[in-house]
Amino acid sequence: MILRIASKEWLNNIVTPRFITGFVLCLLLIPFSIVISINEYKSKMNVYEIEKAKADEENKAKAYSTYRPVIVKKPTPLSIFARGISYNVGDRVKVFFGDKPMLSEGKAESRDNPFLNRFFTFDFVSVLVIIMSLMAFLFTYDICTGERESGTLKMMLANPVSRSAILMGKLLGTFLTLIPMLIFSFGLCLLVIILHKAIAFSGPEWIRIGVMILFSVVFLILFMIVGLFISSRVRHSATSIVICLIVWVIFLFIIPNLASYSAKSFIRVGSSENLEYDINSIEKEFQDKAGEFSVKQQQPDWSGSSYYWGGEDGFKLIGGATKNFMERERRINEYCGPLLIQYADKKWPFREQYLHELEKQQKLAKYLSFLSPSEIFKESASALCSTNYESHNNFLNQTRNYRELLINYYLKNHLFGSFSYFTQLDPGSFMTADELINYESNGLCKTFSEFNTKFHGDWQYLTKIIPNSNVFEWKPIDMSGLPQFEYRNLNVLTDISNSLIYIGVLLGIGIILFWLSFLSFIQYDVR
Amino acid sequence: MIKTIILHEIRQHIFSLRLQLIFVIIFILFILGSVAYIFQFKSSINDYETFSGKAREELLNGRNRGLIRTGNRNVTTIAVENQNYILPPLKNGFIDDSKSKYIPNTIQFNAFNVFGYSVSRRSGNPYLSLSQELNWYFIVSLILSFAILLLSFDSVSGEKQSQTLSLILSNNVPRSLLLLGKYLSIIISSFLMLLPGIIAALIILLISGTIRFDSALLLEVCIFVTVQILFIACIAALGLFCSVISRSANISLLLCLSLWLLFLIFSPNLAVFSAENLFKIKNSETISAEIKTVQDAINKAAPEGSWSMNGGDPFYPKHELRAKNQTNLMNAEKQINDEWYNMQFGQYNHVTIFTCISPISLFGLISEAITGNGYLRFQKNWNDFHTFQSGFLTWFKAIDTNDPKSPHWYNPYEDCSTTRMPLKFEEIPIYTERMMTIPQRLTKALPEILLLVFYSFLLFGTTVIMFNRYDVR
């Protein structure tokens, strides 16, 4: 019986203009949004390739002091479906010893013209959610009221059919009407993607897409039930449609914007520029301390070096200096290396506080937006596409853990206090100032004091260069023995089980509403 | 006669559920939006002041970032220092902020050049997905436009279905007059839906005292409200049009909803799509590669010693070469960049034309012009900055010329071959933003306003013609 009612309902629905409208809307809106998302993904991929090449170059270190690996995360092609926050954040993290990774860097905007940010485009999931929820409402708003108004409900109930069978049948019929539209949308989307040959999904990614389709079915059913509920509570189709549409606008357009706007307004996050000013004072303290230490060290017999290349975060390469000078530098590094890490820990609470505020704001926005079922679905979709906050945070946490791992390696192997931290020369070959002057001046001066008195310390007499002391010509050393970063994406199953919570909530709401509408329909006055 | 029709229709609207529901929503949104805005404005002003205070301090005392410490401030160091100017938050953001947080709002400059612009998200949270601010523009363009369509979709087809239309028309009333009455009544009732919200928002903003209301701001509010009526008129005409071309209320509703969705989703998507496909511009990577090639060539062609420097002696002869080389490098970069910036402006301007097919986007452009916010504000500042920069340079050169201790070899990046006179902080030229005047803004908005009026006339005209032939049976 249920099937018969369903098939009647289905036949009734597919010849209506709303059915055609749904398809036309899908056809007009989905390909556009997909093409835009594909372009965005491609440009993000392009940035990734460039950043990756740069990182590979940068990661070729000539000594341990210069090894501060750059990590670049590969964008996921699933971002085409649900953008999440993936286009707000960069994908590059440089692991410094003097600072823990706070936010990722790199070009975040996927558009080359920043003025185009003015146009808020809708990604596939948003368009899908808007169209499917609208269609679900348009097909269910008159599920009870429509037949009552046309008088056919009375006749139907005069037959030996239970009210629950009618309700189930009607719901099933509507579901069967909407399902082709949903499949059509996904099909259209996948077709556009497949036609763009540049994108290929891996096995687990296909699973994620499959699960997303299943979730969207749940989402569709939920909206149908909301429509049914509204229809079962009112007596006129005209009232029902108005309420449905207003609920639709509230769910789809008001709540998401309201949630994020209130989170932004009521939870205060300091500005990142001002944070940097605060952190600068800690940085200065470090510099003072490091400076103090090096002043206290015994002055070298000669502070000249043929090659000296210094930079940020302990970057230091030295070649062609005296033994005494190298030893002094070694002691400074031995002290400053761990000090750098200590100060990174001192800076971290400020950064953590800032991150905590960001997270609080994000959480509030998220939970407020959960007032709308469509937002719950969108969140679960971006969890499936690994483009949500949790996924990005997971990446950042991994880089932070990796930094600890690297630091532990440095500490365990006493790299900060080693000569190989800043030079490729053999410590056994280091010379005293006299020996060095004698060598470099090609025997013109025997001692350092002679060099000073005879040539007034003029460098042009030092013509002979110690072999292999040119830091710029050093070959990169092999770093494969050091801990390497490997990004572990959250497991498909973890992601699915995480988003299952959301879908569970959706289902729960659905069941309660269905039960309520069932009760209403049982008592529905069919006259 | 028309008065009777209007009064009757308005009464009907006011007692309808849709108007009451939407009225409540709009009212709540106005109140929530204003309260939230007050909080947000306070903190952003606060942040901005802290930031600019610290930036000034840094300018005076030298910066202390990383290992680079610059002491010894003098006229040249101020002139060559790369400064950032961030556009301050505007107090009329509660009307419309034109997404100014997402488009460039920071300008980099020194006395020799206006380098470029970037997007500073002062208190922006990268972990929040993009969302619209809850300002008046949002309420009117999104919620109210939807409400108007909801009010108007069945004004003709609905009455036909309930058979009242033929009854009305059996009276001695011309069809166009009846339609005009309906049209005006929709406009009036939509406006009535909005008015209490606007008044409440204004009262909240006034009481809070965070935003100082001056005559200019009040004028902006008035102009916005006026333009808003034009927008209401356009959407109402659209709703009536949908109502007249179909024979049943259901179909008019479907039409209304589809058009609304198209205007809302299609138009921004179309803009970005056409930017990427029709008006493609070079990307930043290509530009940096181009700059690098040109600069490498300049460095290669530079005479021997162009990179020599002697910090202690400004008259060190090779400083002249160095200054020349640096100037050449700057000019080459500037030329490529400026060309690229112009491409970006051009692309944006082209693309916005496409969005004009949607009244909602059109209204966005008008409201951006009226509030003097968004892209137009940036453009104005960008142009003004070039004037300011030449003034800054003149100031610097005047001091330099009077200094006998300077060889006057202008180097745009370094303090080695120009004056090292000490500096009085008060004398440093400071850029202050000059907002567009109201007439200027109106001129900017005029084409869009005219287009909006044209749309309304076109839609309403077509509706009248079609209604005259409407089969009321």
Image (cartoon, rainbow, N blue to C red):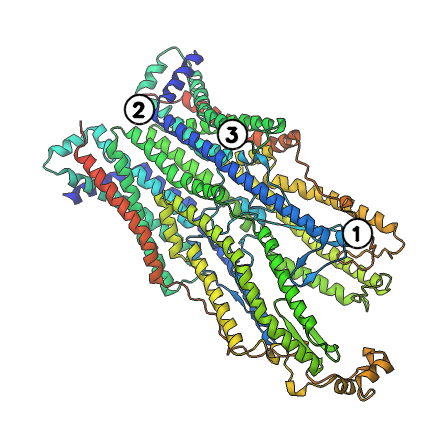
The amino acid at mark 3 is Tyr
Q: Is residue A80 above or below residue A245?
A: below
Q: Which mark is residue B87?
A: none
Which chain is indicated by disc 2? B
Among the two numbered marks 1 and 3 on one chain, the one whose residue lies closer to the N terminus: 1
Nearest the eye: B16 or B431: B431
Q: Is residue A329 above or below residue B419?
A: below
Image x and y of residue A481, in percent: 50, 79
Q: Which mark is residue B455?
A: 3
Q: Quadrant of residue B297?
A: bottom right
Q: CA distance from mark 1 to mark 3?
A: 57 Å
Q: What residue lies at 59% left-to-right and 71% top-to-bottom?
A: A337
Which chain is indicated by disc 3? B
Q: What residue lies at 69% left-to-right and 56% top-to-bottom?
A: B63
Please indicate whether residue A346 sits to the left or right of residue B441 in the image. Answer: left
The amino acid at mark 1 is Val
Task: Say which residue label 2 marks.
Answer: B161
Task: Say which residue label 1 marks.
Answer: B75
Q: CA distance from mark 2 to mark 3?
A: 28 Å
Among the two numbered marks 2 and 3 on one chain, the one whose residue lies closer to the N terminus: 2
Residue contact at pointers 2 and 3, CB within 8 angstroms: no
Which chain is indicated by disc 1? B
Question: Which quadrant would the N terminus of chain A be assigned to in this image?
Answer: top left
Which secondary structure, mark 2?
A: helix
The amino acid at mark 2 is Gln
Which secondary structure, mark 1?
A: helix
Q: Are marks 1 and 3 on the same chain?
A: yes
The residue lying furthest to the right in this view is B404
Image x and y of residue A152, in percent: 18, 31
Residue contact at pointers 1 and 3, CB within 8 angstroms: no
Please indicate whether residue A377 sits to the left or right of residue A76 in the image. Answer: left
